[in-house]
């Protein structure tokens, strides 16, 4: 499979590095409007995980300066869209119409209507469409989902994700382009909850937003009939210095499961009082995500582990959560 990466910001550079690890995939082209990045100099790139960019050898890679040029490249089988969020739906639809398979970074669109339009185009095109919801490929979250299949009814779930406001990226601070800090960040946990429990019956959320000060916080409760409360919380905590972290605590009938960011094991505390930590496999979740997409393309099958329909639902649910926050915690039925 020959892949083109569109956009060489933080996620684009992360994906480029991951693609280079994968057998059976050729990084055939990159697209950027930045000549320095097209030359392979990604050293100025920063991200919320603390890793910085690097120098890459693009001597054997075709270089495109516009989306149109990249989509017109007949040697490309698939595109990996790592552009700002406001371009995701437009470029994904254009790429599908150009006959390309499409991996589009999360979120798949800025609102539910745009997201559903992308999904419809994916079905119509017959190509493989997948959103880059990398949480589904992180070992701790994969292990939790597997454990919950036999752990009995859910009693309570708590997911938290937070970081500093991204001082390295102007477009992320513009809600017209990114959807805002909460939208960009917590959609990971929203998508994960949909993957485990489906869409909730209702949602209510409170919080605070002051993007100029680098603060964008949301505390949301998702209601599932017959199950305990599912809480998603986090956001941006002032600029620059606040470290990235994520975690979960999930209580089911038979056990409590916990994982703090960076822990090498999923912690399981059973109802009989015993503890059973499960060592998690090491590996690059981004590489696992991209390898799965490439496998789907090679085998001509849709991505059941990360279906675009659920990625579209995550966008819609995030919008409901933000609407509830704006209404001071009013319950919104999904």
Image (spheres, rainbow, N blue to C red):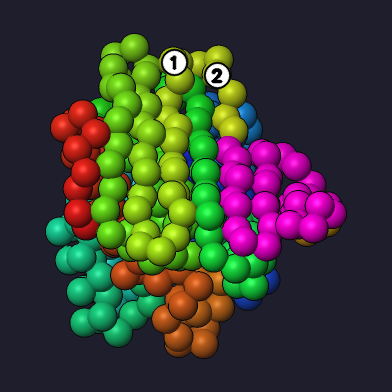
* Residue drawn at the location 44% of the way across and 49% of the way down: 230
Asked whether 263 falls inside the magenta stretch, the response is yes
Give the vertical position of 277 relative to 52 (above or below): below
Give the quarter of the image for residue 95: bottom left
Question: Is mark 2 in CB contact (under 8 Å) with mark 1?
Answer: yes
- Most extreme residue toward the top, as rendered? 213
**Res 209 seen here:** yes
Q: How many labels does the image show?
A: 2
Q: Which residue is drawn at 64% across and 67% down?
A: 151
- Please, what secondary structure does the residue beneath circle 1 have? strand
Establish if 137 lies above or below 171: below
- Residue labelled with disc 2: 242
Q: How crowded is mark 2: few (under 14 residues within 10 Å), some or many (20 or more)?
A: some
Residue 140 at x, y percent in the picture: 67, 54
Question: What residue is shown at x 51% (from left), y 87% (from top)?
Answer: 299
Residue depicted at 44% across the width and 42% down the height: 232
- Residue 75 visible in the snapshot: no
**Mark 2 to mark 1: distance in Å?**
7 Å
Locate residue 90, reporting x and y percent: 20, 57
85 left or right of 254 in image: left
Task: Tell me where residue 8 sits by quadrant.
Answer: top left
Asked if the stretch drawn in magenta spans residue 308, the answer is no
Of residue 320 and residue 35, the one placed in the foreground of this image is 320
Q: Is 218 left, or right, of 289 in this rendering?
A: left
Residue for badge 1: 238
- Indicate the position of residue 110 as horizontal and vertical percent values: 23, 48
Percent x, y of residue 169: 39, 27
Going by the image, does 131 lie left or right of 240? Answer: left
Highlighted magenta segment, given as a residue range: 246-275
Q: Which of 231 and 188 is in front in this view?
A: 231
């Amino acid at each position: 499979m020959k892949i083109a990466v569109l956009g060489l910001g933080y996620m684009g550079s992360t994906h480029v590095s991951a693609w280079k690890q994968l057998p059976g995939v050729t990084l055939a082209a990159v697209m950027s409007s930045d000549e320095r990045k097209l030359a392979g100099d990604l050293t100025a790139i920063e991200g919320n995980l603390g890793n910085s960019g690097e120098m890459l050898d693009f001597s054997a890679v075709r270089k495109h300066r516009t989306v149109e040029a990249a989509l017109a490249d007949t040697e490309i089988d698939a595109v990996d869209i790592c552009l700002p969020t406001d371009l995701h739906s437009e470029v994904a639809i254009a790429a599908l119409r150009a006959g390309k398979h499409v991996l589009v970074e999360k979120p798949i669109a800025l609102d539910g209507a745009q997201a559903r339009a992308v999904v419809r185009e994916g079905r119509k095109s017959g190509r493989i469409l997948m959103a880059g919801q990398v949480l589904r490929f992180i070992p701790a979250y994969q292990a939790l989902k597997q454990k919950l299949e036999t752990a009995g009814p859910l009693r309570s779930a708590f997911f938290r994700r937070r970081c500093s406001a991204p001082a390295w990226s102007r477009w992320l601070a513009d809600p017209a382009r990114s959807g805002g800090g909460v939208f960009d960040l917590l959609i990971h946990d929203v998508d994960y909850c949909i993957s485990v429990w489906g869409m909730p019956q209702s949602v209510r959320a409170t919080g605070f937003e002051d993007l100029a000060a680098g603060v964008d916080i949301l505390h949301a409760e998702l209601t599932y009939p017959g199950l305990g409360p599912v809480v998603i919380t986090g956001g941006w905590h002032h600029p620059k210095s606040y470290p990235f972290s994520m975690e979960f605590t999930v209580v089911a009938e038979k056990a409590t499961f916990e994982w703090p960011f960076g822990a090498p094991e999923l912690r399981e505390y059973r109802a009989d009082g015993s503890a059973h930590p499960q060592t998690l496999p090491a590996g690059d979740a981004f590489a696992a995500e991209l390898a799965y997409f490439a496998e789907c393309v090679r085998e001509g099958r849709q991505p059941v582990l990360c279906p675009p329909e659920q990625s579209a639902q995550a966008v819609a649910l995030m919008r409901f959560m933000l609407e509830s926050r704006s209404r001071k915690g009013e319950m919104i039925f999904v």
